[in-house]
Image (tube, rainbow, N blue to C red):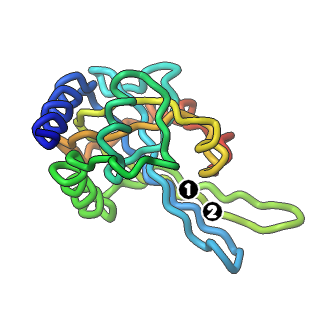
């Protein structure tokens, strides 16, 4: 009975998901430090019907899989999402049915993403780093939510997160040069994750 209830909850969450185009950005941060030489992040920017950034939406840290059904429900219900300190009765029906498929799709497209920008950051007294940004377009069901203050401090990220419920389509579409500025304005370079 508990599994049936979980499946019904999962179906309700999926049916109430936003479905829209997303600009998926893979951020590759390379530094000349001895530890953490390369870090990869995925962020997304919501796009309108014309595939332009939704003004003021900003970039959000993306989770393709690895979240529980209760985290998904919290996101859909616009409640604060707790990433750490989960209870032992958490269920992972979404992970088992769709999450792993999403992760595999992203792994397959990761090397096919197009270059958006390359930025060199020179630090005076410490180290240099290079940030490479790659992109692709996704048609996906997702939700956007806030995480707890504890989680923000724990993962070093102060913005909203985006949980991908299901990826429907991947488009390797060229962004016109005249849209580049609008996209750059939506990327939150001041966030601590950078």
Secondary element at image label 1: strand
Q: Which residue is mark 1?
A: 118
Q: Is residue 28 above or below residue 160?
A: below
Q: Is residue 159 above or below residue 24?
A: above
Left or right of 172, for residue 29: right
Q: CA distance from mark 2 to mark 1?
A: 7 Å
Q: Position of residue 109 (x, y in %)?
A: 27, 59
Q: Earlier in the sequence, mark 2 or mark 1?
A: 1
Crowd tier of the residue under label 1, counting other residues whose Cα lies within 10 Å: few below 14, some 14–19, many 20 or above:
few
Res 112 → quadrant: bottom left
Secondary element at image label 2: strand
Furthest-right residue in this view: 125
Res 78 → quadrant: top left
- Choose mark 2 or mark 1, whichever is in front: 2
Q: Which residue is mark 2?
A: 130
Q: Position of residue 2 (x, y in %)?
A: 16, 40
Residue at point 27%, 47% (across, down): 91
Circles 2 and 1, Cβ within 8 Å, touching? The answer is yes
Q: Position of residue 113 (x, y in %)?
A: 33, 56
Furthest-bottom residue in this view: 34
């Amino acid at each position: 009975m508990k599994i049936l209830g979980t499946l019904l909850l999962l179906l309700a969450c999926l049916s109430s998901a936003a479905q829209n185009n997303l600009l998926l950005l893979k951020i590759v941060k390379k530094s000349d430090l001895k530890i953490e030489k390369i870090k990869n992040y995925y962020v997304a920017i919501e796009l309108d019907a014309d595939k332009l950034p939704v003004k003021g939406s900003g970039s959000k840290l993306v989770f393709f899989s690895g979240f529980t059904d209760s985290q998904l429900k919290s996101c859909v219900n616009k409640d604060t999402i707790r990433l750490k300190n989960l209870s032992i009765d958490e269920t992972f029906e979404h992970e088992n049915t769709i999450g792993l498929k999403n992760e595999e799709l992203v792994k397959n497209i990761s090397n096919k993403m197009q270059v958006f920008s390359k930025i060199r950051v020179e630090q005076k007294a410490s180290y240099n780093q290079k940030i490479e940004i790659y992109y692709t377009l996704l048609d996906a069901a997702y939700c956007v939510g806030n995480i707890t203050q504890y989680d923000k401090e724990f993962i070093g990220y102060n913005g909203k997160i985006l949980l991908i419920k299901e990826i429907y389509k991947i488009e390797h579409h060229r962004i016109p040069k005249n849209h580049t500025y609008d996209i750059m304005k939506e990327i939150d370079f001041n966030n601590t994750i950078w």
